[in-house]
Image (cartoon, rainbow, N blue to C red):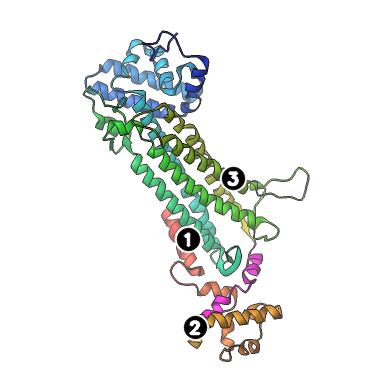
Amino acid sequence: MSNKMWGGRFAAGPGAIMQEINASIDFDRRLYRQDIAASKAHAAMLAKQGIISRDDAAKIAHGLDTILSEMESGKFRFKRELEDIHMNVESRLADLIGPAAGRLHTARSRNDQIATDFRLWVRDAIDDIDAALAGYQKALAEKALKHAATVMPGFTHLQTAQPVTFGHHMLAYVEMTARDRGRFADARKRLNENPLGSAALAGTSFAIDRAMTSKSLGFDRPAANSLDAVSDRDFVMETLAAASITAVHLSRIAEEIVIWCSPLTGLVKLSDKFTTGSSIMPQKRNPDAAELVRAKSGRIFGALQALLVVMKGLPLAYQKDMQEDKEAAMEALSALMLCVEAMSGMVTDLTPDAARMKAAAGAGYATATDLADWLVRTLKIPFREAHHVTGRIVAAAEQADVALDRLPLEKMQAIEPRITKAVFGVLSVERSVASRVSFGGTAPKNVTREAKKWLKRLG
C-alpha cells in the first residue's frame, strides 16, 4: 500500500529498507511543539484569508490542542510508517476531526513546514542556552567577587608567569561567555525569518498572509525568497558554530580544573558532588565532571562539521540530504546545555586553596617583571636594560636558592649599585597584583569593581 499522505501516483509502498532510511520520526518528534504551533498559526491565517472556513479552522485548532495534550502526557503513539512529525500530526488530526484535517496542508509543503519548525526549535534552544550561560556567568562573577584578592599564579606556556588573582581568572571566563552569548544572539537575529508560505520551493498561488503567520510565531519578517527559505540551513550551521566556540571555552576551563585538582598542584578542590572514585584505588578523587565537559566538546564540533559536509554540494532547493540537519544538531545543543549546567555547578562548588595558590604564585620568580618595572620607574633605566639586569638578579636568587624578595640587597647591588631597599616594596605577590591597576588588570579593586558590574548586569 502506498503512503496515504503522499502516495497518489504510487501503486505500492516503499520497501522495508527504504522506510528505515527515510523515517525521521525517531528524532524529529522533538519538534512537536513547534510543529503544532506553526500549524495553528497557518490554519488561523487560512481562515482569515477565506481560504478555509472558520469552522474548519476551529476544528483544526481544537484537534491540534488535543494532539499537543496527548504528546505532553506521553499518550500519543508515534508511527514510523508515517515518516515524520508532520505526517504523524496530520494523520492523528484526521482521526480526531475527519476530512477538515485535510485542509490544513493547503498553501504549504513539508519543505516550508520543516524549515519553520526547525527554526522555531533552534530559536528556543538558543534562548535556553543563553539563560544557562547567564547563570554560568553569574556563578563565575560571584566566585570572582569572593576571591578578588586571592593571589594565584598566572601562567604562560603553563609556566609561572606573573601573579594574578583567582577572581581575575574567573572574570576572564565571564568575558569569554559574554562573547559566546553575543554569537548566539547574532545567530538568533539572523534566523528569525519565517519560511512558512514558501511551500515546496516556489511559493503558492493562494492569497496567503505571511506577515500574519510571522507575527503569530514571533518571527521578525517573512523570508524574502521561497527557494532560499526552504533550502537554507545557515541558521543551524551558525548556531552550531556558536555552540562550538562556547564548547571550546568550556573545555578550556574544564582542563584548568582538572590541572588545579591534581595533587601535583592542589590549587582547588571539588566536593563529592562533582567527583567520582576509583573501582580499585580507594584514595582516588577524579574530576570526572570536568573531564566529560572537556570530552563532549568533540560531539559539538562534529555536528558542525557533519552539517557543513551535508550542505556543501547541494543545489537549490530542498534535497532529502537535509533531513540529516536535525539529529546531530539536537544532540549537540543538548550536550552543550548539559555542559553549561555542569560547569556552573562546578564553579559554584570548587574551593580554592588560598595558601597553596599564594605559595605557587611566588614560585618561579613570578615578580621579576615587577622588579624590571621598578628599575624603569625609579632608576630611569630603559626597559631592555632593566630586563637584562633583572635576569641577572633572578639568576643570583636561583643560585642562592631563595625567593626574589629574600635575596639580600647587597647581592642585588652587586649587579646594579643604584638599587635601594625600596625595591622590596614591589617584590611580594600581594604588592604585585595590587599594582596592576591598568584597565583590565588584575588589581583586587579592579576585580571587585568588574565583578560587581557583571553581577548587577546579570541580575
Specify the amino acid type for callout 3. Answer: Ala
Dot 3: what SS? Answer: helix
Q: Is residue 77 visible?
A: no
Span shown in magenta? 353-376
| Residue 66 counted in the magenta span | no
User: Dividing the image into 4 quarters, which one contains the N terminus?
Assistant: top left
Q: Position of residue 286 (x, y in %)?
A: 69, 49
Q: Is residue 236 visible?
A: yes
Residue 451 - label? 1
Q: Residues within 10 Å of mark 2 (few under 14, many from 20)?
A: some
State the separation of the CA atoms marked 1 and 2.
32 Å
Q: What residue appears at the point 33 percent right and 39 percent down from the top-left corner?
A: 192
In this rendering, would 103 be left or right of 441? left
Q: Residues within 10 Å of mark 3 (few under 14, many from 20)?
A: some
Q: Is residue 236 above or below residue 416?
A: above
Q: Position of residue 297 (x, y in %)?
A: 54, 45
Q: Which residue is mark 3?
A: 295
Q: Earlier in the sequence, mark 1 or mark 2?
A: 2
Q: Is residue 437 above or below residue 220?
A: below
Q: Which residue is mark 2?
A: 376
Mark 1 or mark 2: which is in front? Answer: 2
